[in-house]
Amino acid sequence: MRADRLLSIMLLLQVHKRVTSRELARRLEVSERTIHRDMDALGAAGIPIYAERGAAGGWALSEAYQTNLTGLNEAEIQALFLTTPPQLLADLGLHQAADAALIKLLAALPAISRRDAEFARQRIHVDGAGWLRAREAVPFLPAIQEALWQDRKLRIAYQRNDDTTVERLVDPLGLVAKGSVWYLVGAVEGAPRTYRVARVRAAEVTDQHCERPADFDLAAHWEQSSIEFRANLPRYPARLRADPAVLPALHAPGRYARVEHVGEPDAEGWLHIAMLFEEEHNACEYVLSFGPRLEVLEPQSLRELVRREAAGIVALYAERRLVLLYK
C-alpha cells in the first residue's frame, strides 16, 4: 500500500511539477504528517525531491528526473477500461480515438492483465442517459471544444429559459457532462457562469485570447455551483397521508419531490409522510398521480387545489360519458 502511494506521489509531482503537502494528503487520503514521512522515504531512496517555501511553494522533483510506470495493478486496469459513456465521447469526436487508445493499451498489457481488463469490460457498462430524457442536439459543441483547446474567447447566441436569445462573449473554462447533458462553464467579464450547450443557437471562435484564472479548478467549481443550485431550489413542504403500498414509489428519485420523513402508521395503517416539492403545482400533479392512495393533510391550500383538480377530472369524464351515450 505504501509503495503504491510513493509511486503515486512521484507521478503527481512529475505531472503537476509542484504540489503542496496539503494537496497530496487530500488526493491520497492520508494526513500531511504521513506525506512528510513519505518524502523522507523517497529522499532516502535517492529520489531527487525537494521542498520550495513560500506562497507558491510545495514539493517538486528535479526537472531532469523522470519515472516510468512499469506496472498496473488489477483495480487500476479495470478502472482504465471502465471508460466514459460512448455517447459523450462521440459528442466530443473522440469515440474512435478512445477505442484506438484502449486497443493499444490492451496490446501493451501482459496476458494476465488483459484478462483483468476484459473481465471488467464484460461486467460493467456505464450508460449516462436517463430512460425518459431524449438525447439533446448539441451542434455547436465542436466550436465550443475548439475554443477550449485553443484558449480563445467564444461568441455565443444563447436561448434563455424565457425563450429570449442573448449574445455573450465568453471565456470558455470547461465542459461538464451531467448524465447525457452538456454544460459550458464560461466567464463573462470575469464572473463564471453555466450555459446548457443544447441552448446555444450560434457559436463563433474569436481571435481574442481566453482569460483563464490561474487558480480555476473545473471539478471544484462544478461541485460548489451544484451545491448552491440545489440549495436555491424552491422548497414547498407538504404533509401527506399514504397507503403503505405506494411507499417505494414515493422514495423513487424525482425532480420535483423528495421524502423528508416517514411517520408511524395511523389507526387505518396509513403512513404520515413529510415531503418537499419545488412548487405547489408540482405537489398537486404528484398527489393526483397516486389517485386515492395519497391524501394531502397540509397545507390546506394544497388540499383545496387537489380537491378542485380532482373534481374537474370527475366532471370532465362525466360530461364525456353523457356525450358518448347520446351519440
Image (cartoon, rainbow, N blue to C red):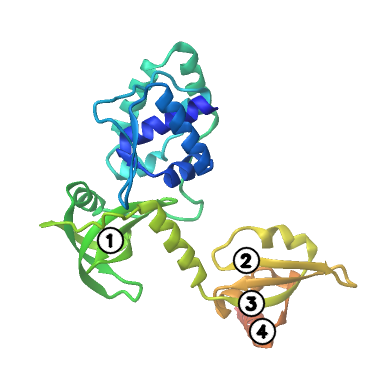
Q: Secondary structure at mark 1?
A: strand
Q: Which residue is mark 1?
A: 186
Residue in the image at 54% along x and 64% along y: 255
Q: Secondary structure at mark 4?
A: helix
What residue would you read off at disc 3? Answer: 237
Residues at circles 1 and 2 in contact by the CB criterion of under 8 Å: no
Give how far across and how far down residue 290 sits, in percent: 68, 68
* Label 3 crowd (10 A; few <14 / some 14-19 / many >=20): many
Label 4 packing within 10 angstroms: few (<14), some (14-19), many (20+)? few
Q: Which quarter of the figure has residue 21?
A: top left
How many neighbours does mark 2 have within 10 angstroms: few (below 14), some (14-19), or many (20 or more)?
some
How much space separates mark 4 and mark 3, taking CA atoms?
24 Å
The residue that disc 2 covers is 258
Which dot, 3 or 1, sits closer to the camera? Answer: 1
Along the viewing direction, whichever of 318 and 36 lies nearer the viewer: 36
Q: What residue is pinned by disc 4?
A: 311
Label located before the other in sequence (1 or 4): 1
